Amino acid sequence: MSSQKRVRVRFAPSPTGGLHLGGVRTALFNYLFARHHQGDFILRIEDTDQTRFVPGAEEYINECLNWCGITPDESPQNEGAYGPYRQSERKASYRQYAEELIEKGYAYYAFDTPEELEEERKLQPNFRYSHENRLNLRNSLSLPPEETEKLLAEGRPYTIRIKMPAEETVSFEDMIRGRVSFESGLVDDKVLLKADGMPTYHLAVVVDDKAMDISHIFRGEEWLPSAPVHVLLWEYLGWNDQMPKWAHLPLILKPDGNGKLSKRDGDRLGFPVYAMNWTDPKTGDLTKGFREMGFMSEAFVNMLGVLGWNDGTEQELFSLSELIEKFDVSRVNKSGAKFDFEKAKWFNHEWIKKSDNAELLPQLKDILQAHTVSDVPEGYLNNVFSSVKERLTFVEDFWAQASFFFVAPDNFDIEAVKPKWNEQKESFFKEVIDLFKQQPDWKATVLEVVFKEKIANSGLKMGELMMPYRIMLVGGKFGPDVFQITELLGQDEVIRRIEKALPLFR
């Protein structure tokens, strides 16, 4: 890369709502490629369609990227030398290129009203404005030049459309798919400039990528059908030698079938598809996100990074810096990747295990506070977390797995144990209370030896006593090593819990 121009990539979302995990993955792959090649990652807001603009969406996009740790080098909030970074603020720059295309014969004025086009659609269900019918419609190709001049002088509303060639093969090299070719006659004459003077995506994306000196374009596979329009615009505007390299990323597919993963699939199958919670400002409807569900950002990014990409080894757990180091676009799959929510949860489980306790202690304190538990010494909380962290899928699971460390159980799962209970077992635990009262060294390793020696001397079976002991301390048949629990609860609390639970077993 060093002999070529500087790598500059862009993530260009529309501020129309929540950020789908496919969008975040596109941003991530852009970021990884840029960082791998010591280049620049740009955020550009594509807000040309003002009818779909949603207040708060741009701020939401920024927060998502920040949460994921993929912060842009240039953006509306951090302008560089290539601003502005919102398309609506670049409006003046687009018209000149649309007019230039008309002068060169590559585009034309279209005066058809929305109502007229709607009538055409009723007459032709598969209607598309193209070389096949453009001369039968109201535009500067079908009208006499003086008629066109008259309509323009009157201020008649018009759009500017690209004039797609009837018989041409448009080809380009895709970094993921190799050589890709399209027949131009199968592509309709896309609108480039709308009646309100705003560009469509097709014109704006080419003009802005040129103006911002973008070197590589990573975008979703769904944009492939638009590629011939964009390739021709680079050519028609005389910028062919500066056209960026393309990479069309594979779709993220539904977990239970083919087709692109949608918000509806998430609702149907019970998992989020947005990075963070999104509340629709018009309806007030809340769509849940991965962050609020309890995903660590490291796990979310790791999961997206290997969704459609691998480094050629069996490795699955990658930090962001490892993804940057190993990212190679040739390792991106051509075919779609099925989203697996169980696998996503596995990533979170693994990242909780890998995490530094100190990083998660603030969250744990919030969880305790929500259950009206306060003034827990940090050292104790740290030790408790260490004992249960391997059992957590989400940090929120901490209370379900560890509540007994902070609040003595009121309910005891003794139904399976009670029928086999007898006086010998009761005597055993009374003797254990006396033994524990005299125990000077309250360490799990010591206590385990003491307890098991007592069992060996009693003539009872290990399995008949270990489960009742756990239930006395925890209330159920779960939790980490029972002697680790014994050490952490402390001498007085353990004795108190055995004494409280013992009468219930009779």
Image (tube, rainbow, N blue to C red):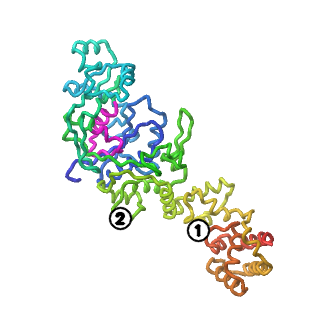
Q: Nearer the viewer, residue 396 or 412?
A: 412
Q: Does the magenta run of residues contain 216?
A: yes
Residue occupied by mark 1 = 387
Q: Specify the amino acid type for callout 1.
A: Ser
Tell me the residue at 28%/45% (across/down). 246
Tell me the residue at 73%/72% (across/down). 417
Give how far across and how far down residue 478 sits, in percent.
Answer: 64, 67
Mark 2–mark 1 contact, CB under 8 Å? no
Question: Is residue 227 in view?
Answer: yes
Residue bounds of the magenta highlight: 200-227
**Element carrying mark 2:** loop
Q: How far apart are the alpha carbons under marks 2 and 1?
A: 32 Å
Give how far across and how far down residue 129 sits, in percent.
Answer: 31, 27
Question: Is residue 42 in view?
Answer: no
Q: Nearer the viewer, residue 7 or 315?
A: 315
The quadrant in which residue 491 appears is bottom right
